[in-house]
Image (tube, rainbow, N blue to C red):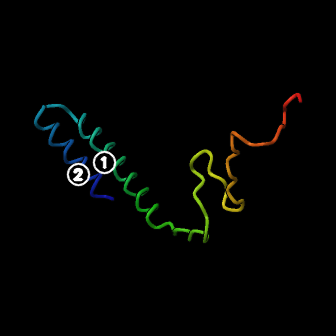
């Protein structure tokens, strides 16, 4: 984690030396190095987080129209059914 910040500062120092600027790129490099270090810490924290085991028979309800695992799926109604629900006869 410290290496990202050091690399950013060294790259900034090198750009300042080559371009003849005074500490402009050191500041930019250190900010970029700190940002990269924060991303690294965040990724490491996500890797260390324990995974919860999936419930047996559980479905992922990420799509619209998928029934939950507790209910059995319902069959679609036939369009030519013999019921006369909603008719005027």
Q: How many marks?
A: 2
Residue positioned 25% across, 34% down in the render: 24
Q: Are marks 2 and 1 in contact (CB under 8 Å)?
A: yes
Local crowd size for mark 1, using a 10 Å CA cut-off: few (<14), some (14–19), many (≥20): many
Instruction: Tell me the residue that label 1 is attached to.
Output: 33
Instruction: Tell me the residue that label 2 is attached to.
Output: 7
Query: Would residue 17 appear left or right of 71 to someone viewing this image?
Result: left
Which quarter of the rendered picture does the N terminus lie within?
Answer: bottom left
Residue positioned 61% across, 64% down in the render: 58
33 and 49: which is toward the camera: 49
Residue positioned 18% across, 43% down in the render: 13
2 and 89: which is toward the camera: 89
Q: Secondary structure at mark 2?
A: helix
x, y percent for residue 31: 33, 42
Query: Would residue 81 appear left or right of 62 to someone viewing this image?
Result: right
Local crowd size for mark 2, using a 10 Å CA cut-off: few (<14), some (14–19), many (≥20): some
Query: Would residue 6 appear left or right of 78 to someone viewing this image?
Result: left
| Residue at the far top in the pictured view | 88
8 and 42: which is toward the camera: 42
Residue positioned 66% across, 61% down in the render: 69
Disc number at residue 42? none
Q: Quadrant of residue 42?
A: bottom left
x, y percent for residue 61: 60, 53
x, y percent for residue 71: 72, 59
């Amino acid at each position: 984690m410290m290496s990202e910040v050091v690399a950013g500062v060294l790259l900034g120092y090198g750009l300042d030396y080559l371009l003849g600027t005074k500490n402009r790129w050191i500041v930019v490099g250190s900010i970029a190095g700190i940002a990269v270090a924060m991303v690294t810490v965040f990724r490491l924290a996500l890797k260390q987080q324990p995974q919860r085991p999936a419930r047996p028979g559980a479905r992922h309800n990420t799509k619209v129209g998928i029934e939950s695992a507790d209910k059995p799926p319902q069959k679609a109604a036939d369009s030519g059914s013999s019921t006369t629900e909603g008719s005027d006869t």
